[in-house]
Amino acid sequence: MKEEKQIKKKLHERNKHRGLYDFDQLKLAVPELASFISKNPSGVDTIDFALPEAVVLLNKAILMKEYKITFWEMPKTNLCPPIPGRADYIHYIADLLAEGNGGKIPTGRGVKVLDLGIGANVIYPIIGIAEYGWEFVGSEVDVVSMKTASHIVENNPHLKQNIEIRQQKSKRNILKNIIGEKEYFDVVICNPPFFSSREEVLAKTTQKLRNLGKEVVGKPVQNFSGQNNELWCEGGEKAFITNYIYESKHFKRQAVWFTTLVSNKDNLKPLQSLLKRSEAAEVRIIAMEQGNKISRILAWRY
């Protein structure tokens, strides 16, 4: 089984968000954002990233300005993702696919991607379609999130042509009942629930808000929001990915690459050992770095 060493990198070279946010342009896309913009101690425009409403409006403006979106609305309770990191995942996946295409990134609807847990925000398909024109199937276990995602897709004609959303009716399964009998994907992507409990989420939120210089009294308010299934599952990230790996072996002839984000580096070694026992032909670890946050993509094929 071939393995690659981790390489630390900043945002991907094709990532649109390597520089500072252009708030003058962003507030033109979403005028409501203007009331949340202020100067930091260096005199640079910013927002208070501890305010959920400000974060949602910023993301909405970015999607409208950079990713061809004309409608993006979702409940306050759903996960509002940091877009630069999500874009990095898509760009690194493009590089992975280019290796099997003579070094050229494959574009257009001939490339089929399965997004496990599309969520209410539809973030990965939005970026993948805008950047590369790929076709997406998104799975979702939460009915409310699925309805919100479908509403976003229906109200953006270019998304409607390139995205199909399927309900995963069993919380025990990940790929089963989603991948059709004769269906084939170029790559599967996944941003798994990271936490193992609601209490763990609240503890992390408290820490994050304090890092942003906020005093926390009582129950903290998450600046990124998120439903149960979006943020935690029994056993956390490791348990979810373990199940995913076991299932992937049953679908090894129906996808070129299986991939997932891995937030906790301590989970890498046991997951790599499992992939070795599962007889994966090749395993990659692709490091991603966004500011102070380091994550990585675990990718494997049979």
Image (spheres, helix red, strand yellow):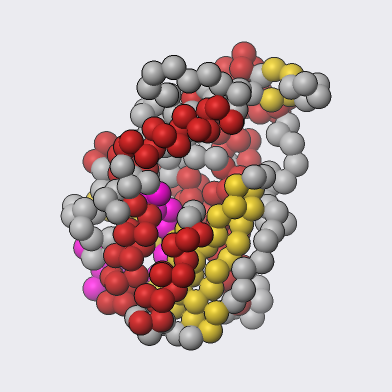
Q: Would residue 180 be counted in the magenta stretch?
A: yes
What secondary structure prevails in the magenta region? Answer: loop
Q: Nearer the viewer, residue 1 or 207?
A: 207
Q: Is residue 34 above or below residue 183?
A: above
Q: Which region of the structure is painted magenta?
A: 177-194
Quadrant of the image occupied by residue 55: top right
Q: Residue furthest top?
A: 35
Compared across the picture, whether 114 is left or right of 212 comes to: left
Viewer-nearest residue: 232 or 190: 232
* Residue 107 visible somewhere in the drawing: no
Residue plotted at (56% across, 21% down): 214
Residue 1 lies in the magenta-colored region: no
Q: Residue at image x 41%, y 34%?
A: 203
**Which residue is more in the foreground, 138 or 155?**
138
82 relative position to 218: left or right? right
The total number of labels drawn is: 0
- Quadrant of the frame with the C terminus: bottom left
